[in-house]
Amino acid sequence: MSARETILGRLRRRLDGPLTPPVSDFSVMSGRGWGREERLRRFEAWITSVHGEVIHTPRADWTRVLARVLADKGIRRLALGRAHPVAAEARAALAEAGVTLVDADRPVEAWWETLFHEVEAGLTSTAGGVAETGSLWLWPTPDEPRLLSLVPPIHIAVLDAEAVEDTLFEVMERHGWAAGMPTNALLISGPSKTADIEQTLAYGVHGPRELVVLLRH
Amino acid sequence: MSVEPPGVQTFTPQAFHRQAHDALGNPQIRANFRSAMDGLMGKRREAFADWELEALRELGASVRLRALAQLPDLLERLEANCQANGIRVHWAEDGEAACRLIRELCEARGAKAVIKGKSMVTEEMHLNAHLETAGIEALESDLGEYLVQLNDQTPSHIIMPAIHLNTDEIADVMHDKTGIPRTRDVDAMTAAARAQLRERFMAADVGITGVNFAVAETGTLCLVENEGNGRMTTTVPPVHIAVTGIEKVVEQLRDVAPLYALLTRSATGQHATTYLNMISGPRQAGEQDGPEEVHLVLVDNGRSAIYQDDELLDTLRCIRCGACMNHCPVYTRVGGHSYGTTYPGPIGSILMPHLMGLEATKDLPTASSLCGACGEVCPVKIPIPALLTRLRREAVGEGRGNVPGAGSKRTRTEAAAWKAWQWLATHPGAWRGAAGVAGKLGPLTPSKLGPWSDHRVAPKPARHSLHALIKRHRSATDEEGQS
């Protein structure tokens, strides 16, 4: 008999008999009743409490703000996609900015060394934000692959204010996650961190040291 | 005979008393755990301040119970949905079978270097040592696990593996084992580890991780972490092997939301971890990164036996947050290594007897004052104190006998003493007689009562029993009333 059959058999022939599944009341997970301002205030308070940086920008102006962030942080090599409007607009605006744009929309094996050793920041779009936890949610795509938000020392994420929702539970329900999950879905709350050395917080242990959110209004 | 390198110590549950005694006498260990656990208790309290905590715990418990109530069906559903997503699913009856299976998966790829994300179930089966015997190097990438591995130790906490080491000790390890200049600067040490491990991620043939929640509905594996090493391990190497106990399955994707909210706040007082990484398949055609192969290894290793019993079943609700140890007055004083088991603290004391048998672990269910803190903070409401007392009964052969090693702690003398006590306590006449005799013999009763009287004065029977005193008092007041 296979291990599978043995294990399932043991579980099915349970000594104390079959169990009745309880019903779960999920009401505590939603119904926060926050208005737009409260929602954004909470999002910003939580993500900055874990070392995330939020920069507000009018939607029409966002690429100028991006260029300033890159200049302020001394970023000369930026990896980004191409097809997503965020990537396309950034490419157009940065063409003359003296920043080397590194294509992320190709198999990662083709640019390992550049990605791991040369790229200083990764730019990604986001699918939305979660106010309750100060989180971004991303569904990486061939245009903006998984490692773009992980390997470069700085992650710059573009988020639209109206895409911030109250709770993770509501995001999952409203956007029908269960009906079709992507290969990888991510919730990101701040830059990579550890407290494994005597409870002392340190950032950028494996992933980005900095997370910059460009919040577009 | 093997000679252990200096500083390396092997801990076993059989030696719990000696290990606990040593730890209690070690001011460094006391201080490291005390400050860490005090901080964690405070952070947890703050993190739940805005929540209807009882409603959330109730929901967490019901999510876990609902999953366990349908466990065989959900495992089949998980398997089918994972397979539909391109994840290959394997089953292992015990740790040894799981190790073999994982080794074969590695060998099939000609793997020599494995990078690991944090996984307690692989600690449970001693996977690293097994892979080493096959010439496969397994390197831990979680910073705490990396430090513990460099120091030839095992984790002393399920969430903070290196909590027993302080900054100076870690500075020594980093200097001695990786050759960096000696520094106490945490940022510098973290940056050094980042650089060392990045090369290893890129060179690894296989990434191995645990799983926090496996979603049956969608065939999704959820990993909760702060460092990003889990994302690296599941994205960079060409093969990802996820290993999980069979109890980690949940029914629906929405079930993840309350469990995640409970897990991060209970574990470290965080409102969210840096990453919640949800994996539903290997790299698809057209995608630029991610592993070519994703495997899920479902490990039983004693869990289906726990599953048989209505009371013991609650053990399997655990989401491995560590809150029970952070709040345990015993754990916070003796530290994780004293228990000598993969899972220390209250959860270890109710889980390890099933994995190792009560004979080896008979001192663990009694390593508790039954103060109830563990049960009060448990995010999924596991009645840990009740389970500790159940295992105490099983250990002395007074339970249902369905825990391995049941009855191994029973001694004839103790059993006879309790039997006599029980008989006396239910026979008032005999009780009064015995109490009278004991009162007269007071000074002659033993002053040594085993370990119990090591730090306590043995009780001496009173010359007159409470009954006799009340009787005398009554007759005195009656006389007063009559006069």
Image (cartoon, coloured by chain):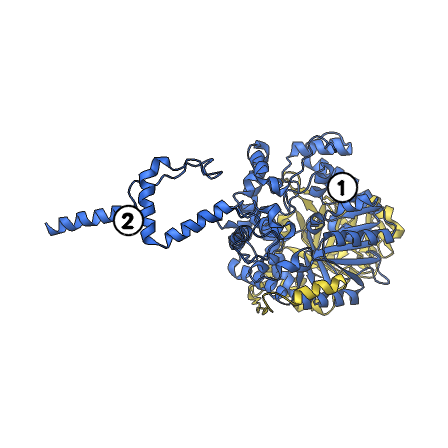
Chain colours: A yellow, B blue
The answer to whether dots 1 and 2 both sit on one chain is: yes
- Residue B352 visible in the snapshot: yes
Point out residue B87 in the picture as x, y percentages from the top left corner.
Answer: 79, 62
- The chain that hosts pointer 2 is B
Of residues B146 and A106, the one nearer the viewer is B146
Secondary structure of residue under mark 2 = helix
In the figure, residue B257 lies in which quadrant? bottom right
- For the N terminus of chain B, the quadrant is top right
Of helix, strand and loop, which one carries label 1?
Answer: helix
Please give the name of the residue rendered at 31% of the width and 49% of the height, measured from the top-left corner.
Answer: B432
Give me the residue at 67% from left, 64% from top: A10
Q: As rendered, which of B37 and B318 lies closer to the eye?
A: B318
| Label 2 crowd bin: few (<14), some (14–19), many (20+), radius 10 Å | few
Mark 1: give few (<14), some (14-19) or many (20+) Cα within 10 Å.
Answer: some
B141 relative position to B322: left or right: right
Point out residue B238 in the picture as x, y percentages from the top left corner: 84, 53
* Residue that numbered label 1 is attached to: B194
The residue identified by callout 2 is: B467
